[in-house]
Image (spheres, grey):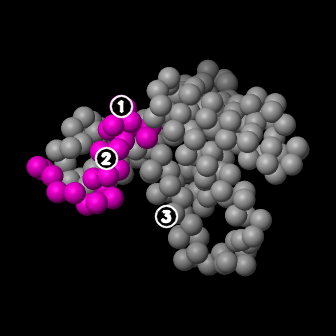
Amino acid sequence: AAALVDQAYSYPGSFSGVTLLLATYGYAMQIYCDFSGYSDIAIGCARVLGFRLPVNFNRPYMATSVTDFWRRWHIPLSTWLRDYLYISMGGNRKGRVRTYINLMVTMLLGGLWHGAAWNFVLWGGAHGFFLVAERFLGRWINLKKVGNSHMAILARRLLTFHIVLLGWVLFRAKDLPTVKVVLWRIITFAEGLD
C-alpha cells in the first residue's frame, strides 16, 4: 500500500479522485498494519523475556463511534491522553460545556504531539469535534432505540471508519495545500492523469 499512497500523496493533482480515495483507504490499512505490527512484535519479544505488555490495538476499524475508535486505537496513547490531559483538566466533572472544551483541548494537544504542523493540529481538532458531537448528539439520540441490528451496527461502523478516514487525509498529507487538493479531488471525483 505504501507505494501507491506515497505516489498519490506526493502528486495529488495528477491523480483522479477515485485513485486518491483508494490511496487513502490504503493509508488506513498501512498505518494500522505498521503500528499494530510493530506493537505485536514488541509485545511478543517482551513476552519471551517474561514481561507482559498491554494490547495496543483492539480491532479499531470495527469501532461503532469515534469514542469507541479511541478505546481501540493505540490504547496506551489513548489512555495517557485520557488520564494525564483530559482527567487532569477536569474530565466530565465540571459540566457539559467544560467537558466539550476538555475533549477538544485533549485532542488538539494529541494532534500536536504527533508533529508541529497544522495538519496534525487539524487532525486532532477533527477527532475532538466528532467526540464532542457524539456527546452532544448522544443526549438526544439513544442508539438502543435506533437499533442494534446487524445492519445498524454495520452502518455505524462504516460511518465511523469514514470519519476516521477523513482524519487520515489530514494525518498523511504533508501540508494543508495537499489536504485541500486531496479532499477536493475526492469530493468532486476529479479526473486524473492515472
In this orientation, does residue 58 appear?
no
Q: Which residue is mark 1?
A: 174
Query: In the visual, does 149 lie left or right of 90?
Result: left
Residue displayed at 46% across by 27% down: 117
In the image, residue 86 lies at what x, y percent? 76, 36
Say whether disc 2 or disc 1 marks the residue closer to the N-terminus: 1
Marks 1 and 3: CB-CB under 8 Å?
A: no
Q: 10 Å neighbourhood of mark 1: few (<14), some, or many (≥20)?
A: some
Q: Which residue is mark 2?
A: 182
- Separation of marks 2 and 3 at Cα, in angstroms: 21 Å
Q: Which residue is mark 3?
A: 158
Tell me the kind of residue under disc 2.
Answer: Val
Q: Is residue 181 magenta?
A: yes
Position of residue 114 relative to residue 91, above or below, is above
Say whether disc 2 or disc 3 marks the residue closer to the N-terminus: 3
Query: In the visual, does 85 lie left or right of 164?
Result: right
Q: What segment carries the magenta color? A: 170-194
